[in-house]
Image (tube, rainbow, N blue to C red):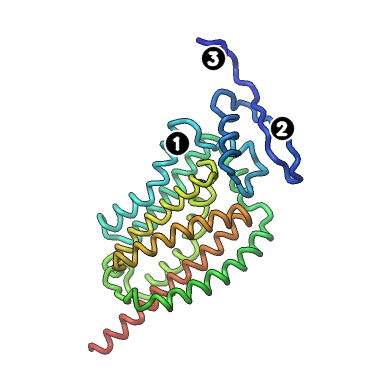
Amino acid sequence: MSQGDSLPPTPVLFGVKSEDDQETLLVVPGLAGVGAERWWRLCARDGADFGPLKAHPELVSLLAARTAPQKAYVRANMAMPTLTMAACLYGFGSAWAAVVAFHLISCILMPSAYVVACAGLDGAARLYAAFFVDLRSQLTWGAFYFVWVGAVGLLLYRALRDFVPPDTTPLIELGITPDPTTLLLFSLYFSVVNPVLEELFWRGFLSLVLGAGERHLLAASAAYALYHGLVLLAIGIDPAVAAALVVGLGLVGRVMSEMYRRTGLASGVLAHMAGDIVVVMALLDWYYSWLQRRRVLE
């Protein structure tokens, strides 16, 4: 055993920039021997920006995926949405199972287990409070994003509608039937719950534990787009159109990461909510067109 191995953990000192851009030294007890100083230097090299959490370097240090088991767990968590969608949509043939399993496993259970294991229940509470600091400013920006994304989304759907013919057969086969109650429940869940959980996972959790450098953000954005690609194919979108939309969603994911870093998680949630509402409106348009065709045939 080396001398370093026989010594108890000592506090780690590292430099970060405070709000007034003055260099400060912060002490994070108990992080010696797990690469904290090296990890922070790598973050500085990659230009990492932890957004609202830059004021909480102790949480960033505790939750950073530095060890091999941590990195493997986070990568598995990042891949889980694609695996869940593939199993539920193509194996069980259920959109409801896909959405609920994705949210429960990928967005809630796996990230929560990681955060509690690394930082404890108190650290988890402080983390989620830090995500929504200065909430008024976040909501103000979010209202602007909501209007802008909603307007652009509606214009895009109108322009692309001829390339995405309204065929509800795959949706009905996946359990999203034209029954008003089913449509209402799915619309509310998808447009309200989904944006919150997705932003917490894709932007909040992953940008924190991966390191928030550009290559990590691009990897998370690619995983975000990939699982959406499986959804698009499952609901009958032409593969060429689906591929183009996946590329676009990858770019959207990267832009959403920048929204989070600059204006907070709640602003991104509202932007995401506007996009999901446009998707719901498109689906309702599909069902309306389908009902119109049925009436003509009858």
Mark 2 neighbour class, 10 Å CA radius: few under 14, some 14 to 19, many 20 or more: few
* Above or below for 205 versus 23: below
Which residue, given by chain and number where applicable, does mark 1 sit on? Answer: 71
On the image, the x and y values in percent for residue 189 come to: 45, 64
Of labels 2 and 1, earlier in sequence is: 2
Q: From this viewpoint, is residue 122 visible?
A: no
Of labels 2 and 3, earlier in sequence is: 3
On the image, the x and y values in percent for residue 194 come to: 47, 60
Residue located at (38% from left, 75% from top): 180
Q: Secondary structure at mark 2?
A: strand
Q: From this viewpoint, is residue 144 visible?
A: yes
Label 1 is placed on what type of residue?
Lys
Residue 62, located in which quarter of the rendered image?
Answer: top right
Q: Of discs 2 and 3, which sits in the foreground?
A: 2
Q: Secondary structure at mark 3?
A: helix
Query: Could you tell whether 217 is left or right of 57 in the image?
Result: left
Q: Quadrant of the C terminus?
A: bottom left
Residue located at (48% from left, 76% from top): 155
Label 2 is placed on what type of residue?
Leu
Residue located at (35% from left, 59% from top): 229
Residue located at (26% from left, 57% from top): 90
Contact between marks 3 and 1 (CB within 8 A): the answer is no
Q: Secondary structure at mark 1?
A: helix
In depth, the one of 239 and 99 nearer the eye is 239
Contact between marks 2 and 3 (CB within 8 A): the answer is no
Which residue, given by chain and number where applicable, does mark 3 sit on? Answer: 5
Tell me, for residue 25, which label it has, or none: 2
